[in-house]
Image (cartoon, helix red, strand yellow):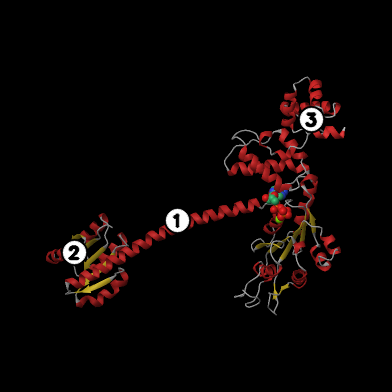
């Protein structure tokens, strides 16, 4: 650390000299015979402690220290004063923000101690200032990050990001907009990966409950007793291990939204609890005799046939009707193939920007395969495949057949006519597929004969069969 500096102001040269002797070993010492001279020194040097006499001709000590404060407020000011002046100096403590005053005559050791304390105080304050600056900077960064995250989040949850221009999805958006700002329970139905959870989030974050919590509970994933305590909370001693009261998700989501995934997997006991929330707006923590009022919007989801569960006695009928006030059925991807190109583009952008790659789309041939695929895993499956392909693709080039996973390459034998393409390459590929299929049909899957018809080598045909993923065995049986 720098040597601390001390400025001593006194109109008597002998005093200055003796004080210099006291302090010069430990500190950088400046001396001044008048306030004016002292101010000049302060103007040019960084001072840790200022020691000033009160009685001086021209400028008195209080006035000098007041001016000194204007120049270097962080310097610690000490006033040296005779007994007679103490009364007058009291004001100075406030006016010139004086740290301490010392009465004459003083012991050198006493003065040393006071100055030492002043230096320590200066260093502490200095550290504080640095920390504060860092804190302010840090806060600004955090604030910026926070707003960025917030905008990103709200953008992500914009209904516009829920891709779907197909009539089926447009119908769903209309329904969502109608129910959004109501307290009505919503039941989201649809196969796995159709976007139920995403839609639930969108409903919450676009609704008038968006400032409050959105909580998610998968009802299929955990044992029933645990699930009850998760959702409704428990009181201390309700069961072994319940060492404290615990607040349930319903309470946490008060005035917000709860998303209950896999609602069809709940037990009868839990269903009773859910019915109570939906009907009375109250919950009963496990082990408690008291109920608690809550206002929570319930969005439930399942990919099971709930009505069938009701018929089979697995799901309470009354709860089913409570939940089913506003059902939204998200159709599987294969029933809204129109959405596939847009989803593909959306996910390509999402994943390529993540790894800063330029991917100008996919080839027509890949899109053909994708639109023909049945997608048992729906949008999630498509999303995962695009992520994979974006990772594999070369920067700057389109995603091609080479990147597509084999399971998507279902036979295009009966699919597109070559002239339905606009690009030459996929059209030629399709022409190859069609001619080869025709030859295979004629020869009932005999590769040697088919190669003769096509006037290519058997090895060449084999390669093509493999490249186009044409299932020869199908021709052996089907035709
Ligand atoms: N219309 C869509 N637009 C954009 N992304 C979508 C769309 N639908 C689904 N996704 C994406 O697909 C993935 C699966 O969606 P989500 O988790 O909401 O499905 P889910 O119906 O809840 O599935 P599960 O029944 O398996 O829980 C998510 O990454 C989601 O972002
Ligand atoms: Mg889900």
x then y, percent, for residue 336: 79, 45
Badge 2, how many Cα within 10 Å: few under 14, some, many 20+? some
Res 235 quadrant in image: bottom right
Residue on which the image places disc 3: 420
User: Which numbered disc flags the more N-terminal residue, 2 or 3?
Assistant: 2
Q: Nearer the viewer, residue 248 or 438?
A: 438
Number of callouts: 3
x then y, percent, for residue 93: 29, 72
User: Which quadrant does the C terminus fall into?
Assistant: top right
Q: Secondary structure at mark 3?
A: helix
Residue farthest to the left? 14
User: Which numbered disc flags the more N-terminal residue, 1 or 3?
Assistant: 1
User: Which quadrant does the N terminus fall into?
Assistant: bottom left
Residue on which the image places disc 2: 23
Gap between marks 1 and 2 measured at Cα: 38 Å
Q: Secondary structure at mark 1?
A: helix
Gap between marks 1 and 3 measured at Cα: 60 Å
Res 389 quadrant in image: top right
Residue farthest to the right? 479
Query: Nearer the viewer's eye, disc 2 or disc 3?
Result: 3
Q: Is residue 331 above or below residue 79?
A: above
Residue drawn where x is 80% and y is 48% of the image: 168
Q: Is residue 351 above or below residue 19?
A: above
Identify the disc placed on residue 137: 1
Res 48 quadrant in image: bottom left
Residue drawn where x is 82% and y is 29% of the image: 445
Badge 1, how many Cα within 10 Å: few under 14, some, many 20+? few
Query: Nearer the viewer's eye, disc 1 or disc 3?
Result: 3
Gap between marks 2 and 3 measured at Cα: 96 Å
Q: Are marks 1 and 2 in contact (CB under 8 Å)?
A: no
Q: Is residue 143 above or below residue 383?
A: below
């Amino acid at each position: 650390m720098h040597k601390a500096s001390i400025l001593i102001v006194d109109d008597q040269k002998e005093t200055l000299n003796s004080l210099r002797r006291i302090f010069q070993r430990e500190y950088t010492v400046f001396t001044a015979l008048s306030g004016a001279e002292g101010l000049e020194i302060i103007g040019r040097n960084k001072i840790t402690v200022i020691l000033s006499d009160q009685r001086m001709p021209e400028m008195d000590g209080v006035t000098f220290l007041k001016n000194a404060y204007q120049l270097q407020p962080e310097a610690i000011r000490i006033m040296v004063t005779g007994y007679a002046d103490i009364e007058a100096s009291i004001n100075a403590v406030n006016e010139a923000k004086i740290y301490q005053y010392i009465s004459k005559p003083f012991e050198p050791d006493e003065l040393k101690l006071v100055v030492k304390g002043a230096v320590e105080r200066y260093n502490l304050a200095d550290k504080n200032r640095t920390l504060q600056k860092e804190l302010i900077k840090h806060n600004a960064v955090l604030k910026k990050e926070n707003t960025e995250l917030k905008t990103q989040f709200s953008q992500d949850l914009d209904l516009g990001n829920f891709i779907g221009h197909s009539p089926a999805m447009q119908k769903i958006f209309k329904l969502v907009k109608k129910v959004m700002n109501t307290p009505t329970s919503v039941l989201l139905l649809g196969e796995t990966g159709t976007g139920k959870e995403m839609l639930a989030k969108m409903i919450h974050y676009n609704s008038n409950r968006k400032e409050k919590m959105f909580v998610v509970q998968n009802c299929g994933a955990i044992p029933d007793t645990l699930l009850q305590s998760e959702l409704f909370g428990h009181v201390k001693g309700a069961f072994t291990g319940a060492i404290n009261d615990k607040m349930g998700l319903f309470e946490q989501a008060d005035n917000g939204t709860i998303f209950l995934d896999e609602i069809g997997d709940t037990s009868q006991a839990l269903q009773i609890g859910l019915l109570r929330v939906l009907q009375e707006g109250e919950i009963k923590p496990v082990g408690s005799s008291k109920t608690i009022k809550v206002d929570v919007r319930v969005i439930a989801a399942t990919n099971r046939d709930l009505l069938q569960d009701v018929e089979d006695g697995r799901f309470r009928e009354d709860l089913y009707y409570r939940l089913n006030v506003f059902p939204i059925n998200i159709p599987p991807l294969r029933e809204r193939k129109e959405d596939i190109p847009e989803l593909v583009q959306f996910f390509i952008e999402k994943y390529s920007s993540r790894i800063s790659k330029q991917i100008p789309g996919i080839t027509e041939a890949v899109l053909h395969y994708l639109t023909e695929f049945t997608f048992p895993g729906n949008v999630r499956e498509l999303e995962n495949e695009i992520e994979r392909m974006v990772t594999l693709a070369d920067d700057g080039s389109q995603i091609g057949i080479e990147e597509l996973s084999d399971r998507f390459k279902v036979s295009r034998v009966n699919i597109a006519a070559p002239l339905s393409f606009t690009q030459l390459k996929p059209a030629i590929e399709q022409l190859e597929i069609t001619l080869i299929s025709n030859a295979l049909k004629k020869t009932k899957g005999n590769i040697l004969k088919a190669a003769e018809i096509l006037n290519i080598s058997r090895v060449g045909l084999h390669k093509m069969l493999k490249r186009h993923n044409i299932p020869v065995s199908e021709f052996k049986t089907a035709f």
